[in-house]
Amino acid sequence: QFSNIGGFTAAKLYEAHSIISDMFLEDNTTFLSFPADIISTGLRGLINDVVKRKLVDVIITTSGTLDHDIARTFGKYYCGSFNYSDVELREININRLGNVLVPDESYGELIEEKVMEQLEKLYSIKKEWATVDLIKEIGLSINNESSILYNAAKNDIPIFVPGITDGSFGSQLWSFYEQHHDFKINLLEDEHRLSDIIFDAKKTGAIMVGGGISKHHTIWWNQFRDGLDYAVYITTAQEYDGSLSGAKLEEAISWKKVRPNARFVNIYGDATVIMPILMAPFL
Amino acid sequence: QFSNIGGFTAAKLYEAHSIISDMFLEDNTTFLSFPADIISTGLRGLINDVVKRKLVDVIITTSGTLDHDIARTFGKYYCGSFNYSDVELREININRLGNVLVPDESYGELIEEKVMEQLEKLYSIKKEWATVDLIKEIGLSINNESSILYNAAKNDIPIFVPGITDGSFGSQLWSFYEQHHDFKINLLEDEHRLSDIIFDAKKTGAIMVGGGISKHHTIWWNQFRDGLDYAVYITTAQEYDGSLSGAKLEEAISWKKVRPNARFVNIYGDATVIMPILMAPFL
Amino acid sequence: QFSNIGGFTAAKLYEAHSIISDMFLEDNTTFLSFPADIISTGLRGLINDVVKRKLVDVIITTSGTLDHDIARTFGKYYCGSFNYSDVELREININRLGNVLVPDESYGELIEEKVMEQLEKLYSIKKEWATVDLIKEIGLSINNESSILYNAAKNDIPIFVPGITDGSFGSQLWSFYEQHHDFKINLLEDEHRLSDIIFDAKKTGAIMVGGGISKHHTIWWNQFRDGLDYAVYITTAQEYDGSLSGAKLEEAISWKKVRPNARFVNIYGDATVIMPILMAPFL
Amino acid sequence: QFSNIGGFTAAKLYEAHSIISDMFLEDNTTFLSFPADIISTGLRGLINDVVKRKLVDVIITTSGTLDHDIARTFGKYYCGSFNYSDVELREININRLGNVLVPDESYGELIEEKVMEQLEKLYSIKKEWATVDLIKEIGLSINNESSILYNAAKNDIPIFVPGITDGSFGSQLWSFYEQHHDFKINLLEDEHRLSDIIFDAKKTGAIMVGGGISKHHTIWWNQFRDGLDYAVYITTAQEYDGSLSGAKLEEAISWKKVRPNARFVNIYGDATVIMPILMAPFL
Ligand SMILES: NC(=O)c1ccc[n+]([C@@H]2O[C@H](COP(=O)([O-])OP(=O)(O)OC[C@H]3O[C@@H](n4cnc5c(N)ncnc54)[C@H](O)[C@@H]3O)[C@@H](O)[C@H]2O)c1
Ligand SMILES: NC(=O)c1ccc[n+]([C@@H]2O[C@H](COP(=O)([O-])OP(=O)(O)OC[C@H]3O[C@@H](n4cnc5c(N)ncnc54)[C@H](O)[C@@H]3O)[C@@H](O)[C@H]2O)c1
């Protein structure tokens, strides 16, 4: 349908579709990166499907993704409005995430319960964990088809979270550490695993949803192999402020994070609209 | 599909769909407003279909819409890239509109030829024209199913262009005026026609694509009947700069341009993506 | 101060400063274009100073500029918040414009009174008016140093408003027309005046605040002399949506609206912050 | 100057000034958070001054801040253009960051040299480091008045980097780890330090430049004391995409990250313009 809209973003969707098709066909190590917020929306289901079908090989995301995935496996979020009064929501213990409503009982309390229980078990096995391994074990323990963590674990898709402490999952780790000072997160081991993936890859491609640390960590590592061969970047951020989030993939060429001959496209728009259009043909 | 994405813009698309459905069902005077740029893309075809099916009653747009509709009926545009060198394009007489390429021969030259020919004829009939009438006559003369102007004329959907002189069509009017100083555009008569439509309407609704003068003229006139009953606003503009384009429909309530109990939604994103999703179910 | 911030927008401010300095020094026809919203803020005072010092030769703006300038000469606006309830504001007859509050009594009612009174007088002189002349006469009648219209009239700086009917001033014209059907706005004569200015200019420069019809009309006319020699564009709009407002000045080179060797810069940000920084050294 | 611009962003700058004044006067624990990109601009100097004068108590930022601060202490960056060809820049080993140019020799190579040297020394002292301590030691070793890391270390302002591995500094840690598998980053200890700061604070305030992990970690920890008392958020991100970066401070109230009675303001714009205006009166 978008092929004959032929202009502006519609034309880019068409291009992105062609890039992703090739990326999936080739013997390519495919990265999927995304920020946490979208896991509070229906995109959680879509990404779960991507993971179930093993369309990607590596996930790089932020701590909030773990929060939302766990929370929504066991609790409920609701659809509200960007205009709700936050002062009133606070009084009834509901957190607002854009127009998504997150009751306390579906979030912090529940994440604490689920994660703490597992940390006890994992700590009894060994005291130092790479986050990628910890996330895999917790993923397996979730044992629920609707969970990205669970399906990623089952399908051996590693989930990297370079900013692991920044969220509720991260706060459980800290809280556990306050009780067990020999409990350690070995985040340099995560980097080691990433280096293995990068240095083993024949070609690499990335679908990057949103900016921030998840995007940067994806392109950062790819610089060690002279850049991505394929890249699709979906964002709402703009270039003029000099931010990493707003930086176009063109800029990444100068940093050797994307190859000069790579196939790539920057798409502007909310991922809750763009991603279903892009991924539907593959699901 | 978007119903169960349930968050951020996807949730709003769902809401917009429900508002538009009701708007189309009711005995409602429906306005469609849009900026010129989208008529250089495939949205021209989509809006043409909307017009053919008489889904809307009134169109308010800008001068460039006339340009692109005429140009593309008789000439060709191409798909390029936002990154093309404008200095080089200039040398080969190609104009760039985002990632759409507009050869001079498909634009200025062609519009001049078509419009001037008709102006001679129309001037021989009478010397003073309301723009809405002039556009209708030129629309009829186009006599081509792919043209929005033609189908709007045939289906008695008036096209209002409050900033008529600002574009190539407008420059033809000026150029004709230089030769015939008694040729007149009676733009206050356009306003009179709009007032008739507004004061006759039982209920009003508007699908507004983009901001600027086309959006404002739509909501401005609706203030004379205490505001729109239904409104969907699609834009990329943001609120913080105080602009009319960035103003949410909420703000229009204070101005009596939208009713306090109206059903309305603001959707952020490129119309080349949003409009096909919103309008497809009705086409 | 911004010279040694040396990066992102700060670096561009520095560049813009140098361009404007040269633009003001040379024998240059200088255009200033802006949307109406900023005239509801303190930028009205700043632009008034620009006009008093004759720093620019031509103004192109939108109908709302006339509204706000007249309203604020005789009435008062207030500072509020983007978050105020528009439903409540409506009940107390206050219109919201971003975080600026516009009481009905300072706006519509007052504009009606002032404009209608003048229209009676002007109509008794002649029945057909170019808008540029009408605005000048009304400007003179305002007779108040705080008014842009007044100072522009006194200093022979023409104010062009290609979308004259779109606002409260415009509605007075329509309303007067309903009572006097031989009252005419000759907007093709406005274009004739612009053509004189363009064809007489040795060099041209433009400071364009915001997009839409005021920006486009400025660059549109400059295409008839192969483009602007100097251009500073301040905007919050983005490129990806294909809009005229978001289009960078680069794009205008392909259209011959800006010369390939012109000195120009695109600056992103709210004009209420950018303009004082840019213009202060000249005031 | 901005006080009488009285509208849109100018009005907010005025409000922010008043909030920051109070924040600095009170017995308040003040957080400053920012993304890395701005440290490639002249804002590095401004933030360095803030640190020298001990205007803030805690810094939360991202790994790239360490990179740019070290790189620019010993190497040079240049001002270029957003339009430079990245393919050509790559060939001459220059990295582009918006319109800032970062030669390889001023970045990766130099950071490697400086950091590796220190890591050897620090590793010989002890094998496990909290990042906040590691950054302090490296800061002290820089021994240069132009360095933020140095002055922060000297003035006992802790710098927290929750996503420490994501950048060149982080890659040195990984690289060192590949040679010394018993070298450890104890990032849970960082969280412990943050918890001490939070639980000791009487009141808290934050100046947050940009979104992402640095903003989130600031508000996240403040939720454990029911929210910030003062907050100024400067961003270019927009609300509609549901992102943490685009989320207004209002939203943070529902999450208890900002108090319902806090004084706060959201300012939209490039920090290279906004920050000098806001901070100049205090420097
Ligand atoms: N957002 C949450 O729900 C949440 C929850 C817990 C923790 N956190 C933490 O906050 C920190 C910052 O969050 P983040 O890095 O995940 O990113 P973020 O939400 O700040 O987003 C980063 C950028 O990605 C883009 N983006 C975000 N949502 C988008 C969308 N729907 N469509 C298109 N583009 C989009 C935006 O340009 C944004 O500036 C992280 O450390 C994270 O763990 C977030
Ligand atoms: N753009 C053209 O092709 C063209 C051609 C000839 C004349 N002109 C003239 O330029 C003037 C200004 O143009 P305009 O008023 O038509 O609007 P514009 O292109 O300036 O757009 C106005 C606003 O609408 C929104 N918008 C535009 N395109 C969008 C999209 N694809 N998706 C979502 N939102 C979008 C943006 O927020 C934008 O700021 C008019 O007088 C017009 O006649 C334009």
Image (cartoon, coloured by chain):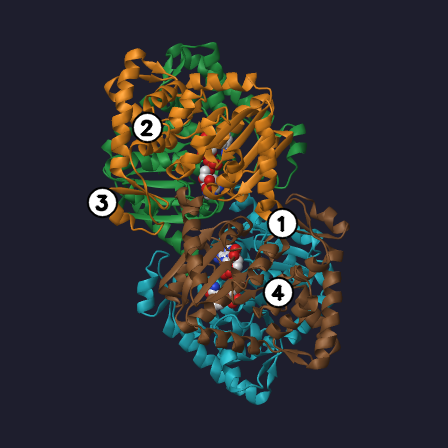
Chain colours: A green, B cyan, C brown, D orange
| Circle 2 crowding by C-alpha within 10 Å: few under 14, some 14–19, many from 20 | many
Identify the residue at image location x=58%, y=45%: D2
Compute the Cα span from label 3 to label 2.
Answer: 23 Å
Residue C209 marker: none
Query: In the rendered image, is residue A83 in sight?
Result: yes
Q: Nearer the viewer, residue A22 or C108?
A: C108
Q: Are marks 3 and 2 on the same chain?
A: yes
Query: Residue D23, how many percent across, how many down?
Result: 58, 29
Q: Nearer the viewer, residue A65 or C183?
A: C183
Query: Residue B258, how many percent across, how many down?
Result: 68, 55
Q: Which residue is mark 1?
A: C98
Chain of the residue where label 1 is placed in the rendered structure: C
Query: Residue B9, how many percent across, how many down?
Result: 53, 45
At label 3, which amino acid type do we have? Answer: Ile
Compute the Cα span from label 2 to label 1.
Answer: 43 Å
Q: Are marks 1 and 4 in contact (CB under 8 Å)?
A: no
| Circle 1 crowding by C-alpha within 10 Å: few under 14, some 14–19, many from 20 | many
Compute the Cα span from label 3 to label 1.
Answer: 47 Å
At label 1, which amino acid type do we have? Answer: Gly
